[in-house]
Image (spheres, rainbow, N blue to C red):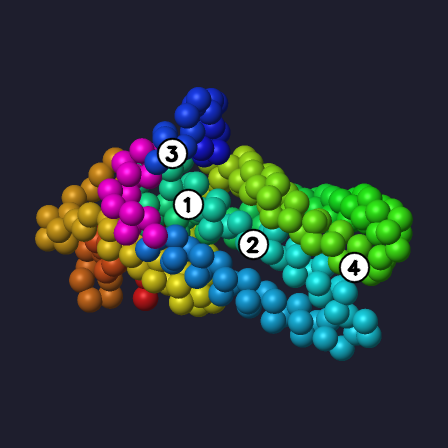
């Protein structure tokens, strides 16, 4: 619904029913949706673990680093924990291509715009921490006053305050984070020109992303190499081959004509060996 709102400017009166129909129309069967969700979520978790190992290595030797690492992990959870939702939302925004291709593009778009999105995530992290502190303090004042009136333990009142704060986070704040991160993502995604080199880099970091990218190519229609003709969208620029003089070459992955001097295919992003 967030992706629809960005594309059409309105949210329908019955968002749940409309969203359900959009999923059915886009994916055909729920199995396709859940496979795609699993691939994107797995890609994100692998990238998040890679960054987590880097931060652990940098902060591990510092005294009292556990508190800093907790804040950093919260920041990573906010900045990276909603990439899968953003990418799945992008598959509805880009209805003109298969969902695997849109999801793979979505991850690359997030990686290309990491500075802007991480800045927004940092602001969101600050608001979340401030909200948790405020809710905890307000709850502790209420519970502490009641417990003190009855002569009960103040420590139990503090534990209840923390539990209430986390309940509020899961019930309300997490939904706000999702909307906030989706809005930040959708503001940059439509105008981003994808750098194909990132497909290879992300595939090297995440086996799940490599599988997702591979599926995106499998879902695309394959042209016949023998009859491939130049199109208006992909102009043919002949590349001189040492063995065959002045013969145009085609991508071994998708069959699209190759552009001279480009190390990547302009259609599928595959590296040309």
Image-based side of 25 in relation to 178, left or right = left
Magenta stretch: residue 166 in it? no
- Indicate the secondary structure of the residue bearing disc 4: helix
- Indicate the secondary structure of the residue bearing disc 3: helix
> If you read the primary sequence from the N terminus, does the residue marked by circle 1 or circle 3 appear first?
3
Q: Residue at x 28, y 43 (%)?
A: 27
> If you read the primary sequence from the N terminus, does the residue marked by circle 2 or circle 1 appear first?
2
Q: Residue at x 86, y 51 (%)?
A: 150
Q: Is there a contact, CB below 8 Å, between mark 2 and mark 1?
A: no
Q: Is there a contact, CB below 8 Å, between mark 3 and mark 2?
A: no
Q: Residue at x 35, y 58 (%)?
A: 212
Given the current orientation, which residue lies at the most extreme bottom position? 61
Q: Where is residue 101? Give x, y as percent.
A: 34, 48
Mark 3 sits on what residue? 19
Mark 1 sits on what residue? 88
Which quarter of the rendered picture does the C terminus lie within? bottom left
Indicate which label's residue lies in the foreground, 4 or 2.
4
Indicate which label's residue lies in the foreground, 3 or 4.
4
Frontmost residue, 18 versus 247: 18
Q: Is there a contact, CB below 8 Å, between mark 3 and mark 4?
A: no
Q: Residue at x 79, y 59 (%)?
A: 156
Indicate which label's residue lies in the foreground, 3 or 2.
3
> If you read the primary sequence from the N terminus, does the residue marked by circle 4 or circle 2 appear first?
2
Mark 4 sits on what residue? 156
> If you read the primary sequence from the N terminus, does the residue marked by circle 3 or circle 2 appear first?
3
Q: CA distance from mark 2 to mark 1?
A: 14 Å
Residues drawn in magenta: 21-34
Q: Is there a contact, CB below 8 Å, between mark 4 and mark 2?
A: no
Q: CA distance from mark 1 to mark 4?
A: 42 Å
Q: Is residue 40 above or below residue 119?
A: below
Indicate which label's residue lies in the foreground, 1 or 3.
3
- Indicate the secondary structure of the residue bearing disc 2: helix
């Amino acid at each position: 619904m967030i992706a629809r709102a960005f594309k059409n400017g309105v949210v329908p009166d019955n968002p749940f029913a409309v969203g359900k129909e959009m999923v059915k129309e886009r994916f055909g069967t729920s199995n396709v949706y859940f496979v795609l969700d699993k691939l994107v979520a797995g890609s994100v978790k692998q990238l998040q673990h890679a960054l987590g190992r880097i931060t652990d290595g940098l902060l591990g030797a510092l005294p009292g680093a556990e508190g800093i690492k907790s804040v950093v992990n919260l920041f990573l959870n906010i900045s990276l924990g909603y990439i899968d939702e953003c990418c799945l939302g992008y598959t509805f925004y880009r209805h003109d291509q298969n969902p695997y291709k849109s999801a793979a593009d979505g991850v690359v778009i997030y990686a290309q715009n990491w500075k802007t999105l991480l800045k927004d995530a940092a602001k969101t992290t600050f608001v979340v921490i401030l909200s948790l502190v405020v809710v905890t303090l307000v709850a502790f004042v209420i519970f502490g006053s009641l417990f003190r009136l009855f002569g009960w333990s103040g420590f139990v009142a503090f534990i209840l305050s923390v539990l209430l704060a986390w309940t509020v986070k899961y019930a309300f704040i997490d939904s706000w984070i999702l909307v906030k991160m989706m809005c930040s993502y959708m503001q940059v995604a439509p105008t981003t020109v994808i750098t194909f080199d990132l497909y290879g880099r992300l595939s090297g970091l995440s086996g799940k992303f490599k599988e997702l990218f591979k599926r995106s190519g499998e879902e695309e229609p394959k042209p016949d190499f023998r009859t491939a003709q130049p199109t208006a969208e992909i102009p043919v620029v002949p590349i001189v081959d040492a063995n065959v003089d002045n013969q145009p070459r085609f991508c071994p992955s998708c069959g699209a004509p190759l552009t001279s001097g480009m190390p990547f295919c302009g259609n599928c992003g595959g590296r040309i060996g």
